[in-house]
Amino acid sequence: MLWRFIFFFSFQAVGGLVGWWQAQLWGVAVGICIATWCWFLWDLWRGNRVLRWLRLGDPQLAPRLRGLWGEAADRARRLLRQSQLQIDASDARLHEILSALQASPNGVVLLDGEGHIEWCNQTAEGHFGFDVERDLMQSIGNLVRDPDFTRYLNTQDFSRPVILQGRSSTASRPVRISVQLHPYGDGRKLLLSQDITALEQAEAMRRDFVANVSHEIRTPLTVLMGFVETLQTLPLTEDERQRYLGMMSQQSARMHSVVQDLLTLSRLEGSPLPGMNEWIQVKALLLRSEEEARGLSATLLASQNKQHDIVYPSAEDMLGAGQIAGVVAELQSALSNLVNNAVRYTPAGGSIHVRWESLENGGARFSVTDTGAGISPEHLPRLTERFYRVDRSRSRETGGTGLGLAIVKHAVQRHGATLQISSVQGKGSTFAVVFPASRIRANKLPSVVRPPASIQPMAGASVH
């Protein structure tokens, strides 16, 4: 404040000197008035600069002043800078929160007190067919016109979710959405949506699986109980007794096969993936599957004059097939199942061609082609489902449990391979397994080779 007093006094002194120089009293008064007005106008100009800057509100444009107005401008500039930093921090936090909500696998919709859409993420757009730019501040009741949702919205009971059809739902690919509202704040609501299609499908598969297992075990068990009661209550001849005992043995073997296949599937799903430290000769696997296929063919066609024409790669081709990394029992079960499947469903006199081909990318392809009745196109996508059969009566006659191809699919997928199925009704089918290059190598490195007789394949009856 001292400099302001000196400055003001200087103006008055100059005015006084001017009056004294003129030796007139009125000149002193005029000089003092001029000095006072000059100082007032100059101070007013400084104050206007500060006010003009405050109207703009940009800290970067703050005037550089001294004195009272300079201190006021500096303090205002610091307050503006702190306020701007707080606003930036709040915006950053809001952006992070919205980014997290945007990345959520669930749909998120923010509604105001009147039920208008204030914001929604991309997942919610897909679930309900929203467009953020078009539907912003639109009423949720006008956009989601499902009667169940309207009833849910009107009852104001949001303790449980409501299940709706997704906007992209079709008859061939149904989509189910779980929607629930959560009130918060001053009448606002948070709408969460979740695609539960996979969960419902899994639950349906679980119910079907339990029902199929119960049916597959209950049927032979009922037969066994009936035969046991017959043996206990009726006088039978020795031939009748032997015939009933044979049927009981057949049903118990069927029940045993189902249980073994279920245990195999459970073991495949629960065990760690096969490593790359054990290499098996492909030739050993092929020889073992050929032995099983020819033995099964001879058993099935023992009473017929015609036999199957089973063609395997030559000994030289088998030797050049190299080695494969994986679990011996799983690989043997997968390959043998496919060949035995072809044997079971190819009529007498038909041919079965088994091939092992090296691929350009370093992988390999094992394929089994038969000349059986073939499979209708509508059945192909479901062949690897558990207990799925094209012809249930025929599958049971040939000893199938409905789990064979499910076991094959799990076994090859655990080795990074893919199962390919193609068929033409009336002309036959081809089942192929394509192995990746990482699990195939030539016969140059030391390997773990097991003789065919020592291989113990997993359970898994064939099924078509």
Image (cartoon, rainbow, N blue to C red):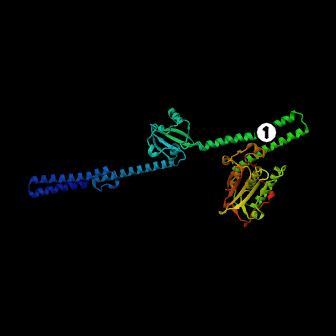
Q: Dot 1 surroundings within 10 Å: few (below 14), some, or many (20 or more)?
A: some
Q: Residue 111's x, y, as percent? A: 47, 40
Residue type beneath disc 1 = Leu
Is residue 413 visible in the rendered structure shown here? no
Residue at the spot x=32%, y=51% of the render? 56
Q: Position of residue 248 (x, y in %)?
A: 83, 41
Quadrant in which residue 246 is drawn: top right
- Residue that protrudes farthest toward the right in the picture: 238
Give the residue at x 29% y 54%: 70
Work out whether 189 lies above or below 13.
above
Residue drawn at 75 percent across, 57 percent down: 353
Residue 12 at x, y = what percent? Answer: 17, 54
Judge from the rendering whether residue 127 lies leftward or rightward of residue 220; answer left or right. left
Q: Position of residue 121 (x, y in %)?
A: 49, 46
User: Does the rendering let one see residue 442?
Assistant: yes
Residue position for label 1? 221
Q: Nearer the viewer, residue 77 or 109?
A: 109
State the image quarter where residue 278 is shown: bottom right
Front residue of 26/99: it is 99
Q: In the visual, does 22 lie left or right of 404?
A: left
Q: How many marks?
A: 1
Direction left: furthest residue: 23
Considering depth in this image, is 175 or 210 the residue closer to the camera?
Answer: 175
SS at badge 1:
helix
- Left or right position of 321 against 226: left
Q: Is residue 105 above or below residue 440?
A: above
